[in-house]
Amino acid sequence: MLPLSSLAQMIKPSATLAAGARAKQLRAQGVRVFDFSLGEPDFATPAHIGEAAAVAVSAGHTRYTPANGILPLREVLAQRYRDRYGLDLSPDDVVVSRGAKHAIFNPVAPLCGPGDEVLIPTPFWTSYADIVEMTGARIHLVPTTFAQHFKLSAAQLRDALTPRTRLVLMNSPCNPTGTVYSRADLEALADVILERPGLAVLSDEIYECLVFDGHQHHCFAALRPELRDRCIVVSGASKTYAMTGWRMGWAIGPAHTIKAIGDIQSQQTGCPNSVSQYAVLAALQSDQKCVEDMRLEFQKRRDLVCEMLGRIPGLRFHKPEGAFYVFIDASVYMGKAFRGQKIPDSDALCQALFEHERVNLVPGAAFGAEGYLRLSYTSDRTEIKEGLERLAGCLAEMA
């Protein structure tokens, strides 16, 4: 057996992808699984986007593109941020990557290295920590609480900063909590960041189009003119257009940082997928009714999930304001037993639910919040209803 590097030994597999793979494996064997693990819309990619991809293939757009993405797509993305958020961007301020996860790693790499710290509020998306550690930088986790709706406060941020803090990683709408920061919330954080010369922000805004009940998404880079040179904003097509497998993400930011990201990509992957770029170009330029239709359906699913979870004794959760997750405090069930199996923590609870009832959730420990469960409501309402009935039955036995 070949020896592994320290990096390979340090990196953990994605808990969400592992849970999703487990469900897919059983489904392939004909087993009924109620899968609430992956953050993957169950909708088909809208037909007009697939048709644009077919046209791109017929037109011969199957060769290498510039490492930072084709110019027409970067122009459209620059225009999108001008129209939506008032940011004055050029195509040189935009880089296209192979999914938003790639677009998150690539700014961290040129901005951070050994000895630097990256501040991350918890609960946090599982991949953030490993992405940071691959650069040699150190993660600095700042816990937020249920009582504060899992929002990092300005006072917490100021107290957590050290001389080594190089980057603050923000996420709104948030995975796993569904929290949406208000403009006032973000402006208070922006003021603290601007007190520190050289401190940068990476704002993961992949769920920007999935907000509910009149809540509004605010682009962090657009909050203050001075943030324009301090902030990298990441988004992508996976959640908005149900294009997870197309692997299309992007980042906007200062041109010199964006150029560095493009240079890194030129060595990593050569370029983003050519056909996918033309598909996303069509998605951005076409009628956005498909986006609104999916958002409204997610809101209906959220309402169903919250109604059913609200009937289960002991569970606590905030009604999500965005994304498509409910983050459930199930700590009251820790320490109990289920069908002869001790349940010491969220991981054991998820394993028991999957083993006995094929209900697949992700333990809160994966997100830095032991005692919680993350439920992704990306299944249809019939699946949600039956799966949550099974969950309720299991927890009733434990109670």
Image (cartoon, rainbow, N blue to C red):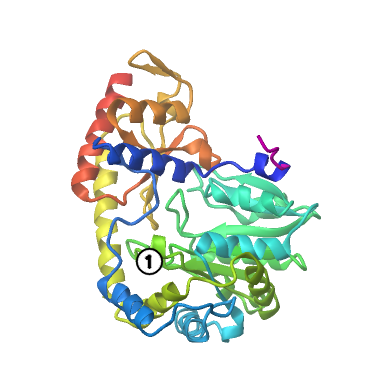
Q: Is residue 179 above or below residue 340?
A: below
Measuring 36% from the left and 33% from the top, which residue is drawn there?
315
Q: Is residue 291 above or below residue 122?
A: below
Q: Is residue 144 above or below residue 339?
A: below
How far across and down, in percent of the image, does residue 159 sit?
71, 50
How far across and down, in percent of the image, does residue 58 sit?
35, 82
Q: Is residue 243 above or below residue 369?
A: below
In the image, taking residue 349 as reference, residue 94 lies left or right, namely right
Measuring 63% from the left and 56% from the top, which residue is drawn there?
154
**How would you rate the neighbour count of disc 1 (Cα within 10 Å): few for under 14, some for 14-19, many for 20 or more?**
many
Q: Which residue is mark 1?
A: 240
Q: Quadrant of the N terminus?
A: top right
Residue 193 seen by the camera: yes
Residue 89 seen by the camera: no
Farthest residue, direction left:
382
How far across and down, in percent of the image, does residue 47 sit?
26, 72
Measuring 66% from the left and 43% from the top, which residue is drawn there?
8
How far across and down, in percent of the image, does residue 268 sit?
63, 65
Main secondary structure type of the part rendered in magenta: loop
Amino acid at circle 1: Thr
Front in this rendered view, residue 310 or 13: 13
Which secondary structure lies at badge 1? Answer: loop
Front in this rendered view, residue 146 or 38: 38
Assess whether residue 366 is covered by the magenta stretch: no
Q: Quadrant of the C terminus?
A: top left
Per the rendered image, the range of residues in magenta is 1-5
Front in this rendered view, residue 122 or 355: 355
